[in-house]
C-alpha cells in the first residue's frame, strides 16, 4: 500500500510556472499510468500557455477563482469545478485577484517536463 501525505511533499516549479506539490507520481511511488499533484497559482498570476503531447489532464479546483483557457475558449472556474484538458490542447489557467488559485492536477500518462510544449 502506498500513501503519501500532501504536507510532506516538497514544492517545485513546473515548466509552465505553477507551484506543484506532487502527491503521487513516478518520483515518489510505484506509479505507472498517472500522476496526482496539488498546484497553486498566486493571486493575479497565470501559468504559461502550453500543451502536452501525450498527457490528458484533469484539474479540480479546490480554492480561489480564475479563468481557464483551452484552445482559445475561456471560462470562469471556482471551487468544485472539474476541467478536462485533452492531449494536444493549448491551455492556461489564471488566478483572479484576491486569493491564490489551488487545484488538483491529475495527468495520464504521468506529468513530465519533457511533455510540456510552449509557443
Image (tube, grey):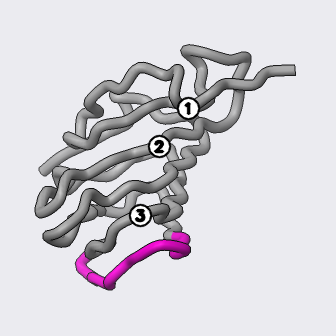
Is residue 50 inside the magenta stretch?
Answer: no
Q: Which mark is residue 63?
A: 3
Local crowd at mark 1 within 10 Å, few (<14), some, or many (≥20)?
Answer: some
Distance between mark 3 and mark 1 Cα atoms: 16 Å
Q: Quadrant of residue 71?
A: bottom left
Tell which of 70 and 97 is nearer to you: 97
Q: Are marks 2 and 1 in contact (CB under 8 Å)?
A: yes
Picture residue at 55% right of the left edge, 71% below the top: 82
Judge from the rendering whether residue 5 lies leftward or rightward of residue 102; answer left or right.
right
Q: Is residue 70 above or below residue 114?
A: below
The boundaries of the magenta stretch are 71-82
User: Which residue position holds label 2?
Assistant: 38
Q: Quadrant of the N terminus?
A: top right
Q: Are marks 3 and 1 in contact (CB under 8 Å)?
A: no
Q: In the rendering, at what x and y percent does residue 13 appear?
A: 26, 30
Which numbered disc, 3 or 1, marks the residue that appears first in the sequence? 1
Is residue 80 inside the magenta stretch?
Answer: yes
Element marked by disc 1: helix
Tell which of 33 and 77 is nearer to you: 77
Q: In the rendering, at what x and y percent does residue 3 appear?
A: 75, 25
Which numbered disc, 2 or 3, marks the residue that appears first in the sequence? 2
Q: Is residue 56 above or below residue 22?
A: below
Q: In the rendering, at what x and y percent does residue 95 appear?
A: 22, 65
User: Which residue position holds label 1?
Assistant: 6
Element marked by disc 2: strand
Picture residue at 43% right of the left edge, 29% below the top: 112
Tell which of 23 and 43 is nearer to you: 43
Local crowd at mark 3 within 10 Å, few (<14), some, or many (≥20)?
Answer: some
Tell which of 89 and 57 is nearer to you: 57
Distance between mark 2 and mark 1 Cα atoms: 8 Å
Q: In the rendering, at what x and y percent does residue 40 appear?
A: 32, 47
Picture residue at 44% right of the left edge, 32% below the top: 21
Amino acid at each position: 500500500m502506498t500513501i503519501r501525505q500532501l504536507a510532506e511533499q516538497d514544492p517545485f516549479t513546473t515548466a509552465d510556472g505553477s507551484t506543484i506539490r506532487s502527491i503521487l507520481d513516478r518520483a515518489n511511488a510505484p506509479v505507472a499510468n498517472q500522476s496526482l499533484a496539488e498546484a497553486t497559482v498566486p493571486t493575479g498570476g497565470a501559468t504559461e500557455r502550453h500543451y502536452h503531447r501525450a498527457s490528458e489532464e484533469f484539474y479540480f479546483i479546490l480554492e480561489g477563482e480564475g479563468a481557464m483557457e483551452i484552445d482559445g475558449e475561456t471560462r470562469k472556474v471556482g471551487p468544485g469545478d472539474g476541467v478536462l484538458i485533452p492531449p494536444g490542447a493549448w491551455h492556461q489557467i489564471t488566478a483572479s485577484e484576491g486569493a491564490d488559485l489551488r487545484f488538483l492536477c491529475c495527468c495520464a500518462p504521468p506529468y513530465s517536463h519533457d511533455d510540456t510544449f510552449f509557443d
